Amino acid sequence: MEPLRRRALIEATIAEVGAAGSLDVTVGQIARRAGMSSGLAHHYFGGKDQIFLAAMREILSRLKERVVANTGAAASPRARLHAIVAANLEPENLAEDVVAAWLTFYLAALSNDEAHRLIQVYRRRLHSNLMHDLRDLTDVENAQNIARSIAAMIDGVYIQLAMDKGKFGATEAITMIKTYLDTQVPQTPEIPQ
């Protein structure tokens, strides 16, 4: 039962943070949404910060799985770059509660060392994934700049979604980032790897 209860608490945390739009939620609210007592939630995680960090680890784990799945099917560096962008902007990642959790996560990273460490892991992984394929398309300096810009655009999409609910979606965001990539690295015939 423990794994199921932990999963229920993690999902409830994402939903509660999404509904509140901040960390201004209690362990009791999270536990109620998960259908259990706050004592049980404390038993499994210790407190709100630990539950929130577990929720963010879960979101990051799901994202990593999607990136691996998407890039595994891509046949060229550009296709893998498109797959990385698409994985970051899949509907599951753009759900209102997940977007709110991401934004809250970034704010928490300013004052919580563990949240800051998790953000750095995510940022390094995204940068490394982008650089892996950008190096095959352009010089290293240009690749660094493009990778930073794409990462900033992905983060910007989350902010845009939070501010303009429903007016900006995954399709528009993916097209925008692909267009940027194509202007920075014009398409040339590529040899599949």
Image (cartoon, grey):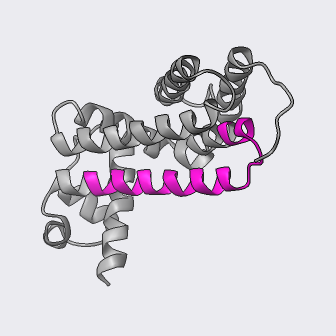
Q: In the figure, 16 relative to 77: above or below?
A: below
> Does 60 appear in magenta?
yes
Q: Position of residue 188 (x, y in %)?
A: 84, 25
Which image quarter: residue 167? Answer: top right
Residue 156's spot in the image, x, y percent? 49, 23
Q: Residue at x 54, y 58 (%)?
A: 65
Q: Position of residue 18 (x, y in %)?
A: 39, 44
Q: Residue at x 29, y 80 (%)?
A: 2
Where residue 40 appears, as percent x and y from the top left, is: 18, 73
Check if residue 61 falls in the magenta segment. Answer: yes
Most extreme residue toward the right is: 189
Q: Nearer the viewer, residue 106 or 142?
A: 142
Residue 89 occupies quadrant = top right
Foreground of the two, 63 or 170 = 63
For image coordinates 44% across by 42% down, the residue present is: 125
* Left/right of residue 190 with respect to residue 172 in the rendered view: right
Q: Nearer the viewer, residue 45 or 120?
A: 120
Q: Which residues are magenta?
A: 53-81
**Image quarter hosting the N terminus:** bottom left
Secondary structure mostly taken by the magenta-highlighted segment of the chain: helix
Depth order, front residue of 128/61: 128
Q: Is residue 122 left or right of residue 192?
A: left
Q: Residue at x 32, y 33 (%)?
A: 106
In this rendering, position of residue 86 left or right of residue 159: right
Number of numbered labels in the structure image: 0
Left or right? Give the position of 8 relative to 169: left
